[in-house]
C-alpha cells in the first residue's frame, strides 16, 4: 500500500501531519489516545483500494505539533476543519475511542462537511469534573517520568478490568516499549486528558447530530462502555448500532477485516446509484 504524508496548518498555526492512502470517496480516520499515524493501518490496508483515506496525527502527537498550553476539543475541531478544507469534498468521518469523541464534536460543529459519521466506543463516561484529580496525578507522574503511575492512572480513567490489564501485561512479558515512542504517547495522553477533563458526560447533547451515524462496539468491552453506547445510539436521531461478537475495545487491531467490512458496507449506502 502506497502512502503519502503532507503538512496541514490549523487556524492557530499548529502543524498537523496527515498520512494519505488510496483513491475514491474521502474518509478521515481519527486515532484514539496513545495512537498516531499508524493506528488505523490494518484497517486502511483493507480499504485503500476503494477510498481516499486521510489519517491525521492529532495535535499533541508527533510528528504533529504539541503546542504549549492546555488543549481543548475546540482546538481539535479547528484542526479537523483545516484537514476537511484540504480534502475539499464532503467526507466520511471515522473515529476510534477518544478519536470517536472528537468525531462527535466535529459532527456537531461542522455537519455540512460530512456525508456520514462512524464512531467506535467513544469513552463518553470518562470526562468532566471527576477526571480532574486523575489529570493532576497523571501530569505529576509525566513530569517525573513515572511510567508505572501513568499506567495506573490511565487504567482508572478507562476502567479496564484488572483481569484484562493482567492479560496484557502477561502477553507483553519482558518486552519494553521504545522510550522515545513511549514518551510521545505519554505526552499525547496528557493533552487528551486535559480536553476530557474540560468536557462533559451528557450524552443527550449529541442529539443535534443528524448525519447518518454508525455506532460500533465490541460485545466483550467492559462496562460502562456498553451502557454508554446504548445511550448514545438512543440520543442520535440517525444512528444505528453494530455489536461485534468476541471483540473488545481493541477490535481495530484484533479484527481489522471485520472493522473494514463494516465500514465498507456502511459507506456503500452513500454511493451514487447512477
Image (tube, helix red, strand yellow):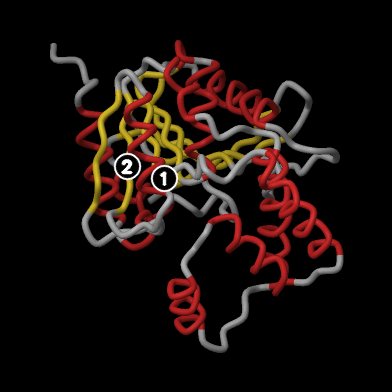
Front-lying residue, 113 or 21: 113
- Secondary structure beneath dot 2 equals strand
| Quadrant in the picture for residue 53 | top left
* 268 up-or-down from 262: above or below: above
* Residue, disc 1: 121
| Mark 2 neighbour class, 10 Å CA radius: few under 14, some 14 to 19, many 20 or more | many
| Quadrant in the picture for residue 21 | top left
* 272 up-or-down from 185: above or below: above
In the shown orientation, is residue 217 left or right of residue 81? left
Check if mark 2's residue and mark 1's residue have beta carbons within 8 Å: yes
In the shown orientation, is residue 252 left or right of residue 106? left
The CA distance from mark 2 to mark 1 is 6 Å
Expressed as whole percent of the image width and height from the top left, the position of residue 194 reads 72, 42
| Quadrant in the picture for residue 191 | top right
Q: Residue furthest left?
A: 274
Q: Residue furthest front?
A: 130
Expressed as whole percent of the image width and height from the top left, the position of residue 263 reads 28, 38
Residue that appears at 80% across and 65% down:
141
- Secondary structure beneath dot 1 equals loop
Expressed as whole percent of the image width and height from the top left, the position of residue 256 reads 31, 55
| Mark 1 neighbour class, 10 Å CA radius: few under 14, some 14 to 19, many 20 or more | many
* Residue, disc 2: 216
Amino acid at each position: 500500500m502506497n502512502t503519502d504524508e503532507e503538512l496541514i496548518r490549523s487556524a492557530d498555526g499548529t502543524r498537523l501531519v496527515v498520512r494519505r492512502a488510496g483513491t475514491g470517496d474521502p474518509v478521515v480516520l481519527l486515532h484514539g489516545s496513545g495512537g498516531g499515524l499508524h493506528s488505523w493501518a490494518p484497517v486502511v490496508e483493507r480499504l485503500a483500494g476503494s477510498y481516499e483515506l486521510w489519517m491525521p496525527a492529532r495535535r499533541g502527537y508527533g510528528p504533529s505539533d504539541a503546542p504549549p498550553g492546555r488543549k481543548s476539543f475546540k482546538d481539535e475541531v479547528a484542526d479537523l476543519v483545516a484537514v476537511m478544507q484540504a480534502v475539499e469534498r464532503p467526507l466520511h468521518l471515522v473515529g476510534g475511542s477518544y478519536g470517536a469523541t472528537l468525531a462527535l464534536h466535529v459532527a456537531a460543529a461542522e455537519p455540512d462537511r460530512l456525508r456520514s459519521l462512524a464512531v467506535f466506543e467513544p469513552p463518553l463516561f470518562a470526562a468532566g469534573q471527576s477526571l480532574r484529580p486523575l489529570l493532576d496525578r497523571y501530569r505529576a507522574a509525566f513530569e517525573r517520568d513515572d511510567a508505572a503511575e501513568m499506567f495506573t492512572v490511565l487504567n482508572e480513567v478507562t476502567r479496564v478490568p484488572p483481569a484484562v490489564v493482567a492479560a496484557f501485561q502477561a502477553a507483553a512479558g519482558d518486552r519494553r516499549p521504545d522510550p522515545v515512542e513511549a514518551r510521545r504517547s505519554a505526552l499525547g495522553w496528557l493533552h487528551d486528558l486535559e480536553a476530557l477533563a474540560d468536557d462533559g458526560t451528557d450524552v443527550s447533547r449529541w442529539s443535534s447530530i443528524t448525519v447518518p451515524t454508525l455506532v460500533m462496539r465490541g460485545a466483550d468491552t467492559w462496562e460502562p462502555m456498553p451502557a454508554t453506547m446504548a445511550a448514545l445510539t438512543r440520543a442520535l436521531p440517525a444512528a444505528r448500532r453494530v455489536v461485534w461478537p468476541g471483540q473488545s475495545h481493541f477490535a481495530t487491531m484484533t479484527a481489522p477485516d471485520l472493522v473494514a467490512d463494516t465500514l465498507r458496507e456502511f459507506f456503500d449506502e452513500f454511493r451514487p446509484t447512477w
